[in-house]
Amino acid sequence: MKLTTILRRPLITEKTTVLREDGRTLVFQVAVDANKIDIKKAVEQLLGSKVESVRTSFTHGKFKRQGKHIGRRSDWKKAYVKLRDGEKLPDFLQGA
């Protein structure tokens, strides 16, 4: 798997902003079939920061209706990445 397909995008929500205030935790939407080792390697190579731990969470897609038609959003996975002591956040996530 390519590194850019493992990390889809950083998640910037109210909850992840509170987690990021400690200066060490980042949250990413990742590929569904990526494991913790793949995520750790991708973050270390793309961002240049050493990773202490990775936690993953699988989010199931919601059922949505439009009149009598029912659709379903796709399932997705997110990863909570904790950086080691002394590592700093990447510049593009500093002010967000």
Image (tube, rainbow, N blue to C red):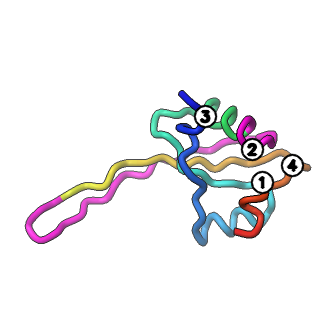
Q: Nearer the viewer, residue 77 or 47?
A: 47
Query: Any magenta on residue 47?
Result: yes
User: Which residue type does callout 4 highlight?
Assistant: Glu
User: Image check: 2 left or right of 41?
Assistant: left
Residue at x 11%, y 71% (from the top left corner): 67
Q: CA distance from mark 1 to mark 4?
A: 9 Å
Residue at x 61%, y 31% (from the top left corner): 38
Q: Residues within 10 Å of mark 2 (few under 14, many from 20)?
A: few
Q: Is residue 16 above or below residue 86?
A: below
Q: CA distance from mark 4 to mark 2?
A: 11 Å
Secondary structure of residue under mark 4:
loop
Residue at x 73%, y 59% (from the top left corner): 92
First in residue order: circle 3 vs circle 4: 3
Circle 2 residue: 47
User: Which residue type does callout 1 highlight?
Assistant: Pro
Circle 4 residue: 87
Secondary structure of residue under mark 1:
loop
Query: Any magenta on residue 55?
Result: yes
Q: Quadrant of residue 24?
A: bottom right
User: Image check: 8 left or right of 85?
Assistant: left
Q: Quadrant of residue 14?
A: bottom right
Rendering coords of residue 7 (x, y %) = 58, 43
Q: Which residues are magenta?
A: 44-70
Circle 1 residue: 90
Residue 3's label in the rendered image is: 3
First in residue order: circle 2 vs circle 1: 2
